[in-house]
Amino acid sequence: MNVFVTGATGYIGSAICQLLQQRGHTVTGLTRGPGKAAALREKGYRAIVGEVDDADLIYAGCKRNDAVIHCAMEFIPSAGLIDSTAVRHMIDANRGTLKPLVYTSGVWVFGDTKGRTVGEASALHTPEFVLWRPAVEEMVVNAKEVGISGVVLRPGMVFGRGGGVLARMFRQARAERVIRIAGHGGNHWSTIHIDDLAELYLHAITRPAAGEVFIATGGMPHRVERIAAEVASRCGPGVKVVNTPVGLAVTQMGPVAGCLAMDQKVASTKAARFFGWAVRHPSILEHIRTAEY
């Protein structure tokens, strides 16, 4: 297949592109700068340079390819408008083609699950930080009515390959001998290894389930204080875990801190039942003990 990937040089997008290429697919990546486009071409991908909400570029990328994976995201004040505009262009470009369109959402749309485990059918209590996402999800789900195989993926906290939230923890631990977490730390994160997540994207384009939403998490949720303690231990003696009140953390980090402080127990077997998808990598705690960051 020829696959158009937005956010192709990002953390998730780069892993998807690599796996697609390994499995014999041709990748066209959208990126914002000539330097990043050159990096894509060096890896054997095609490249389109521009903004994700540019109608002409999105139309060209969609028309030349057999599937679309949208994982570009920059959490700026206009993120919701940019995201919804991009998806609208993708739908307009793909009407009547039955092509797969995979949209990257996230488990944050559930909000704080307050100790309960939730799944795809659970009610959403979406925080303001990602408040636009359920409406965009709905656009993708409803795209089946106009002849598009739209699929929504909701990844948990992504780790692996030296990136994601763990990378920030390791950098802070080594530079400051402290790991600051938002809130009391007793909240849970539901997580997924980036390579397991990339496999799910591959399933979603090769065996599209039009109009479906899938959670992408693996293993048991873990308390954030436990995750931070494992990172501290790995970084040697003297590294402390410091709890920052959520209000102060929001002041220091922005509204993302409120999402990091949410208690999120999110799990599902739906992707396994639809695709035979299975998590093959160790848990985030095991990963911390052996991985290089």
Image: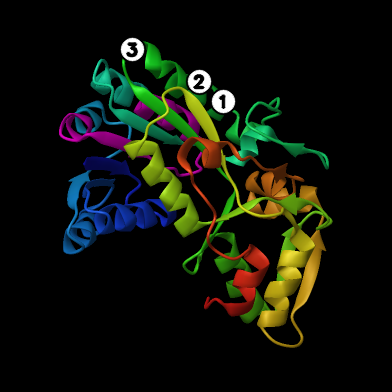
Return the x and y of residue 88 as percentages of the image width and height: 36, 21
Q: Quadrant of the N terminus?
A: top left
Q: Position of residue 233 (x, y in %)?
A: 72, 80
The amino acid marked with disc number 2 is Glu
Q: Residues within 10 Å of mark 3 (few under 14, many from 20)?
A: some
Q: Name the kind of residue labelled 3 in the image.
A: Val
Secondary structure beneath dot 3 equals helix
- The single residue placed furthest to the top in the displayed view is 145
Q: Which residue is mark 2?
A: 138
Q: Earlier along the polypeptide chain: callout 3 or callout 1?
A: 1
Looking at this view, name the residue that lies furthest to the bottom: 237
Q: Residues within 10 Å of mark 1 (few under 14, many from 20)?
A: some
Q: CA distance from mark 2 to mark 1?
A: 6 Å
Q: Are marks 2 and 1 in contact (CB under 8 Å)?
A: yes
Residue 22 sits in quarter: bottom left
Q: Is residue 181 magenta?
A: no
Give me the disc on residue 147. none
Q: Quadrant of residue 244?
A: bottom right
The correct choice, above or below, for 293 with respect to 100 in the image is below
Residue at 33% from the left image edge and 56% from the top image edge = 19
* Residue denoted by label 3: 146
Report how far apart the C-alphas of labels 2 and 3 lie in the structure: 13 Å
The residue drawn where x is 35% and y is 29% is 86
> In this rendering, would 241 be left or right of 171?
right
**How far across and how far down the image is residue 104, in percent?**
46, 38
Residue at the spot of label 1: 134
Which residue type carries mark 1? Pro
